[in-house]
Image: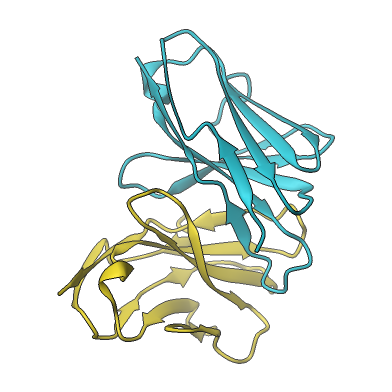
């Protein structure tokens, strides 16, 4: 079964608009972490934001915020005031458990394209 | 911030040869490193978890004799693709977790594009 689901294969957004990338997850663990990574065409993976399962407040990092709805098991990424440089693949990921060896699995990704 | 160095960034090899990819954590110790494989326009698929001083843990469907992983020190893990074939052509990317960071994020290498002729 899919652990991380990203239902938007691609999105087009006008520059300066806000955009929400959807992510839902499935886990029976009480302790887990949720991540968003950006992958530009160069292939590097750029960490954007992290949300712990016990964090009560939504995580924010500059223009990025994570809309964490625990009961719905969703962790949507919100990018405010989008820029041309935001065009990239975006991956939602989850770590289950707290062990140092806990693996991180990725969703299928969303390709975001920003229109000038 | 923590840096993970991956080398080489790209490699072309003949079918039947072996290729070694190195992943180094430059300014932190990583007892655990992860190896992912990514096909074009697809997600990262976890291949194995590399544990310093012990055997790697492979994900289901990944051939451990095909993809040899060695984690000989706290800063170096290697992935060797043995007897490479064209279907092994892919983007391989390593990552390491820097313990002590509050957000426990993974740091990624820049990836290795492997092309097997």
From what the image shows, is residue A103 above or below residue B99?
above
From what the image shows, is residue B102 above or below residue B18?
below
Q: Residue A9 location in percent, x, y?
A: 26, 61
Query: Which residue is at the far left?
Result: A116
Q: Is residue A14 left or right of residue A5?
A: left
Q: Which chain, by letter, is cyan?
A: B
Please state, as top left, top right, bottom left or bottom right, where the C terminus of chain A lies in the image. Answer: bottom left
Which residue is at a point 28% across and 65% down the rendered structure image? Answer: A87
In the foreground, B35 or B45:
B35
Q: Quadrant of residue A100?
A: bottom right
Number of on-image labels: 0
Q: Identify the coloring.
A: by chain
Q: Colour of chain A?
A: yellow
Q: Is residue B41 left or right of residue B18?
A: left
Which residue is at a point 36% across and 65% down the rendered structure image? Answer: A6
Q: Residue A115 location in percent, x, y?
A: 16, 72
From what the image shows, is residue A92 above or below residue A51?
above
Q: Residue A94 location in percent, x, y?
A: 56, 64
Query: Which residue is at the far top?
Result: B16
Which residue is at a point 62% across and 19% down the rendered structure image? Answer: B65
Q: Residue A61 location in percent, x, y?
A: 52, 82
In the foreground, B71 or A108:
B71
Q: Quadrant of residue B66?
A: top right
Q: Is residue B100 left or right of residue B24?
A: right
């Amino acid at each position: 079964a899919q652990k991380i689901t990203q239902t938007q294969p691609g999105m087009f957004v006008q520059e300066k608009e806000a955009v929400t990338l959807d992510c839902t997850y499935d886990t029976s663990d009480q302790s887990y972490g949720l991540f968003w990574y950006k992958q530009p065409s160069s292939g590097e993976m750029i960490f954007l934001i992290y949300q712990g399962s016990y964090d009560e407040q939504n995580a924010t990092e500059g223009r990025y915020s994570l809309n964490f709805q625990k009961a719905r098991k969703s962790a949507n990424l919100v990018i405010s005031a989008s820029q041309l440089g935001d065009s990239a693949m975006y991956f939602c990921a989850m770590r289950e458990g707290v062990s140092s060896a806990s693996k991180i699995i990725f969703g299928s990704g969303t390709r975001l394209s920003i229109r000038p | 911030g923590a840096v993970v160095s991956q080398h080489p960034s790209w490699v072309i090899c003949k079918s039947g040869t072996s290729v070694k990819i190195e992943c180094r954590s430059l300014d932190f110790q990583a007892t655990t490193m992860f190896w992912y494989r990514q096909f074009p326009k697809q997600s990262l698929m976890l291949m194995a978890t590399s544990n310093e001083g012990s055997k790697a843990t492979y994900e289901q469907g990944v051939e451990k004799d095909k993809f040899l992983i060695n984690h000989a020190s706290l800063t170096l893990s290697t992935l060797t693709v043995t007897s490479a074939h064209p279907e092994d052509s892919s983007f391989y990317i390593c990552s390491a977790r820097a313990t002590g960071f509050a957000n426990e994020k993974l740091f990624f290498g820049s990836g290795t594009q492997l092309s097997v002729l």
